[in-house]
Image (tube, rainbow, N blue to C red):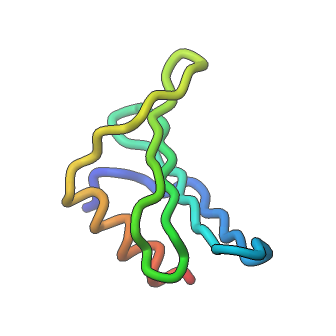
Amino acid sequence: MKPYKMTNMIIDDDCAVEEYVTAEFTQNSKNYSITFNKADLEIINSWVFEDGTSFPADLSDEIIESIREDVKRRI
C-alpha cells in the first residue's frame, strides 16, 4: 500500500514554453503539491500546506519516485 493518496492531477498542455504536471496528494494528514516538467518528469517544485500557509516540502526520494510513476501512468 502506498504511503500517500493522490487527490488531484493537473496537466498543463497549453503553455507556450514548457508543459507541467501538478500532482496533489495527502500523506500523514497533510496536503502536498508537487509539480513536474511534463517532458521529462523532473521536479519543478513541491509544497506542503499547513494552517493556511504553504512551505517547501521535504519529500523522500521513494515518495517522489512513486508519485512520478503514478503521474507517468496517468499521462
Quadrant placement of the N terminus: bottom left
**Residue at the spot x=20%, y=57% of the render?**
61
Spot occupied by residue 19 in the image (x, y as percentages of width and height):
64, 74
46 lies left or right of 28: right
53 lies left or right of 56: right
| Camera-side residue of 16 and 5 | 16
In this picture, is 4 found above or below 37?
above
Q: Quadrant of residue 64?
A: bottom left
Spot occupied by residue 6 in the image (x, y as percentages of width and height):
48, 57
In this picture, is 48 found above or below 40?
above
In this picture, is 39 found above or below 2?
below
| Camera-side residue of 28 and 11 | 11
Spot occupied by residue 66 in the image (x, y as percentages of width and height):
30, 67
11 lies left or right of 6: right
**Residue at the spot x=60%, y=19% of the render?**
52
Spot occupied by residue 43 in the image (x, y as percentages of width and height):
41, 61
Q: Quadrant of residue 30?
A: top left
**Residue at the spot x=46%, y=50% of the render?**
45
Quadrant placement of the C terminus: bottom right
**Residue at the spot x=66%, y=63% of the render?**
10
